[in-house]
Amino acid sequence: MNPDIIKERQNATFDVEKLTNILDGGPEKTKRRREIEALVLSDPDFKEEDPNFLSRSERYDQAVRKSAQMILKLREYGIADPEEIYCYKTSVHPDRPEPLDLHLGMFLPTLLNQSTPEQMDRFFMPAWNLEIIGTYAQTEMGHGTHLRGLETTATYDPATQEFVLNSPTVSSIKWWPGGLGKTSNHAIVLAQLYTQGNCHGLHAFIVPIRDMSTHEPLPGIVVGDIGPKFGFNEVDNGFLKLENVRIPRENMLMKYAKVEPDGTYVKPPSAKLTYGTMVFIRSMIVGESARALAKSCTIAIRYSAVRHQSEIRPGEPEPQILDYQTQQYKLFPLLAMAYAFTFVGQYMKQTYHRITGDINQGDFSELPELHALSAGLKAFTTWATNSAIEVCRMSCGGHGYSRSSALPDIYVEFTPTCTYEGENTVMMLQTARYLVKSYRQAKDGQQLSGIVSYLNEAEHRRVQPQPVAARPTVVDINDLASLVEVYKLRAAILVELAAKSIQQELQRRKSQEDAWNNSAIDLVRASDAHCHYVVVKLFTDKLGEIGDTAVHSVLSTLALLYALHGITQNSGDFLQAGLLSVPQVLLISVRIKELLSQLRPNAVVLVDAFDFHDKKLNSVLGRYDGNVYENLFDWARRSPLNSTEVHDSFHKYLKPLRSKL
Amino acid sequence: MNPDIIKERQNATFDVEKLTNILDGGPEKTKRRREIEALVLSDPDFKEEDPNFLSRSERYDQAVRKSAQMILKLREYGIADPEEIYCYKTSVHPDRPEPLDLHLGMFLPTLLNQSTPEQMDRFFMPAWNLEIIGTYAQTEMGHGTHLRGLETTATYDPATQEFVLNSPTVSSIKWWPGGLGKTSNHAIVLAQLYTQGNCHGLHAFIVPIRDMSTHEPLPGIVVGDIGPKFGFNEVDNGFLKLENVRIPRENMLMKYAKVEPDGTYVKPPSAKLTYGTMVFIRSMIVGESARALAKSCTIAIRYSAVRHQSEIRPGEPEPQILDYQTQQYKLFPLLAMAYAFTFVGQYMKQTYHRITGDINQGDFSELPELHALSAGLKAFTTWATNSAIEVCRMSCGGHGYSRSSALPDIYVEFTPTCTYEGENTVMMLQTARYLVKSYRQAKDGQQLSGIVSYLNEAEHRRVQPQPVAARPTVVDINDLASLVEVYKLRAAILVELAAKSIQQELQRRKSQEDAWNNSAIDLVRASDAHCHYVVVKLFTDKLGEIGDTAVHSVLSTLALLYALHGITQNSGDFLQAGLLSVPQVLLISVRIKELLSQLRPNAVVLVDAFDFHDKKLNSVLGRYDGNVYENLFDWARRSPLNSTEVHDSFHKYLKPLRSKL
């Protein structure tokens, strides 16, 4: 164990295990998580070659091998709870996506939710037993988030009682679905349904794409891998071009909408039913942001505790780089953010489950708010995490660029969350739509409830962006409740600003749609402020649940840092609205420096509390024992380019060059 | 040619070629650049396999092959001007680093600058003819930017008249030098020189590391590749462990400092002489920022002109995504930044050459300012570009994640500039040191000249951070000169704030060093504001040189957007200092929207003006002809995972799994 890191752990002011339990949701959860992790990490069947040393094809091969093992073992151990499966899976493929993700996460659940009993009989057990391996083919080359624009067609032919599927244009080729390129033999294809000459919009069809025995593509199917990407090397994201592919009528998923044998279309009873999955996945992504950020902070902070560099005071030994104010200023606000997002993730999961309960009893009332919140928070947390991972990586100097640090991989595996499951800017605008609608309702005298209820107050208090000097400033910058209040007022003002921008555009005789587009910058800004308020509020609320004094104290410091740092990063908003005075903003900068010093002794243990096993972290820089350099050297020597002392290119090109010059 | 993109080009309000000439530095330069590019791009010897489809070893192999060809052809064509060589090289390896970079860019120049005539005879021609292939081994595993901390030792042994080189610790292993792992047979090693029992600090030694004939590592040399990184796949960044390696006394580069045969150390005449290279490289990086950003903008803006998605007005065809205000707000400020950085890069190059002339005549007076400026601007432009590339990538939705977009590669090849040649935070603090020093000089009554002369005024005008209402606001937000002035005042105020923070710390009886560290956040902020001012100023200055009215008009719009966008992003600073009023900040937001609309018709031609040949851009999304989708499909089908219809893993793992479940 590196002596620096031992010393750090001796300095802790709180019991790390207690904090870990809070993060897991209770001591039993911590225990069970560790049990499952141990099952995987001690299992020789999951031993792997470092993917960084493999070719793309070898990486895919290794991932398929491990996924197949995983399916067997999950059955063997009888692990069936979705959270436990998730925990097992992320230990087998340490936070990397894998080829069967869409089979397990989309194909099977969609069958469960949208199949008729007859379809369940025909498809579910074969899929459960991996005879049928499926994917979910929605996105096309030309369309992603805007689903209505999808072009694939499924035209019903009553003569043969079949659907004929086609990719009518290049841009309609299905593009991106995981596991589509090489792994799957079936796909649930989303296509525009045509019957009796009418288009009825998107519906889902089960399409066999490869021969069950030879795995060769079936006639009319052009399928393959979409080529190398930024990350996702283990996954065969694929393309699918359909050329007059005929499937039986019974392969349309018909639990809700139906096409009768004669081609008559029967509408589904409610459109809201497909809403839930989307909300669920977006809520989950908030938790994934927290995890990616927590891992990055763990690596950067542990490394900063063992790396010594340069000098603060001449003649003294080189200090740990964690002692530099600039390093603390880079990392501690991100550490605070990791905690904030973890608690927001917990809240989203709980809320989702609560509201799902309501929905099952026919109560959809809270769904729109959750939908808006999950969209905005998905964008807010993934954007922030995306930048933060790179700050962590760059805070490790040169070694952050080495694949051995794991930071490049954390980044490339995480960054797609900004785009998939709803492109972030579109997500922010969806939340804004809800906010503006709520604002107008409040203005029309409706009493709002839930998280947007502050828009009621905005009406009453008539917060105005100026004049600055006129507003009395009663904010206590050391009081979280007071800070939640200013974040709330900032959100209220920015929602109002956006709504007024739309109003002004309308007064200039612009259409509703143009007015909306011409206010989009303001709308995104309003959504962002709303989400920021929600995060500060939920972090503060969480403190109320923490019984342990020492843990409460350190988490309060983190929450305060998160709130104050957010203010300095957006000080224009707060000054502009007159919510804070100039002296207060200056004071906040001073206070932040104090908080950095205050957190310094606990920094390493605060990342220890995330409790990432070394094998899951998979980072030479982030090792629990802090023994970075010797392991970096070992890792490099195992790299494939070192398998021979002399690379062929010397004999092929460099040596012959001499005689030519 | 895609009809959308044809239409865009028809809308141009200026002559694209004229702008290209300005960017190149004159019509002759444009002509010559295109000639050189054509030489490479039409040369079948440089045909290559898409690196994205190759393994690491194959990529390195291909790069060595092309570099060897490049050396031959440069001799053949007699291309010898450094700028022309650079242009040729970046066409051979489209903006990718290559294995001979350090041989050409560091090994040969260091020989030229620091060799004695005898050493020139012995080493230069063999190195010129690629018998000796060299690298520059400075960075160690434990030390980067902080050179004094390097641990490698070179101890003089007068008995044999040799130096004995050693890597005394794991952390002293040389780490990162390009071309060290596999390519080089010599290295210039930076080591602490010990003679007659004294350490004389870092000196450079020529160390043979591989056998000239077999290329096997020599005795005492442990050398290899440091393993996979984030980018830089073509380069064998290496490690070098020295175990009692003996080299003749004459292998120390002795043009300046010397060790006599008896071990007597002779000091160099001036320490400033090694300063120049560093300043030069940092100045060049500013230009590289501009180029990386210009490429990213080209790809994102062209793609946004051909991509149609969603709807603004119901019933109408899907709009080009470039018509969305949010998309314009993401991309146009970055386009403006690309122009700004291009002009700053031109300025830095010119200034460097001017000052080099002075230095050759013994006048070092301007060197400290250039040193400070190059450090800060290197950090300012690389950080901004680093984030901007990712914004461009994510603005392309899902396809930005495909390697075919080129955006992932632009990012990973560019991001190391934030760390190498001086870690950015350290660079910002170096600039801050100069600013604080200048501020104190001004306060002591000295009259400052050059770019920091505004610190004189600050003294006079006694700008105070508040009260806000007290300052008359005379800023014209449509006048660039007026905006340069507010940026200048912001910088002056933030320099003063940082200097005062140090002062306060000193008053609290902190040491100079602790006071500095405890003010580091403020110091970085001050540097950042200083650099921002310089960029706005240089962009504005450049406009004065533009004769063509139409070009002048569009560049003025870009400059205004750059300046105003920077204000909204840092509005807290301007409000806090009372430099702008709240209504002005609100007006600026409105004005920015107008500028976005104004730039919209010229967006595509403004990126066309950068004149990146399709083969250099190497991006399916950024193609000049806009034919994105069909080429994306072609590219994917050529991907190695599609060389067989059925991947082996099906037979190895998936099919056998069925019988086990």
Image (cartoon, coloured by chain):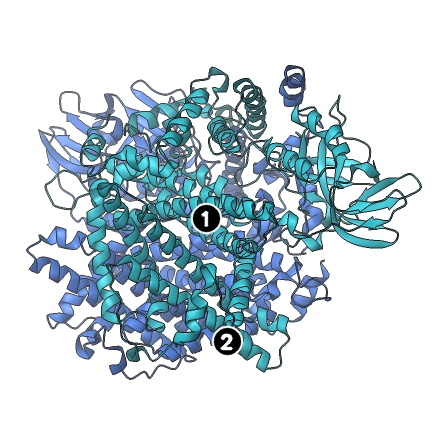
Chain colours: A blue, B cyan
Which chain is home to disc 1? Answer: A
For residue B500, the mark is 2
The x and y percentages for residue B146 are: 65, 55
Instruction: Identify the element where label 2 is drawn.
Output: helix
The three-letter amino acid code for the residue at tag 2 is Lys
Q: Total number of numbered labels?
A: 2
Question: Given contact means CB atoms under 8 Å apart, are the residues at marks 2 and 1 in contact?
Answer: no
For residue B617, the mark is none
The x and y percentages for residue B438 are: 52, 66
Q: Which residue is drawn at 49% across and 27% down?
A: B88
Q: Which residue is drawn at 62% across and 73% down?
A: B512
Q: Nearer the viewer, residue A560 or A358?
A: A560
Q: Quadrant of residue A268?
A: top left
Residue at which label 1 appears:
A80
The image quadrant where one finds the N terminus of chain A is bottom right
Which chain is home to disc 2? Answer: B
Q: Residue at x 42, y 41 (%)?
A: B292
Residue furthest out toward the right:
B159
The three-letter amino acid code for the residue at tag 1 is Ala
The x and y percentages for residue B47 are: 47, 19
Q: Nearer the viewer, residue A141 or B136?
A: B136
Q: Which of A258 and B458 is in front in this view?
A: B458
Q: Quadrant of residue B605?
A: top left
User: From the viewer's perspective, is residue B412 above or below residue B366?
Assistant: above
Q: Is residue A73 left or right of residue B166?
A: left
Q: Is residue B44 left or right of residue A159?
A: right
Give neighbour class at mark 2: few <14, some 14-19, many 20+ (Cα, 10 Å). Answer: some
CA gap, disc 2 to disc 1? 62 Å
Residue B542 in sight from this viewpoint? yes
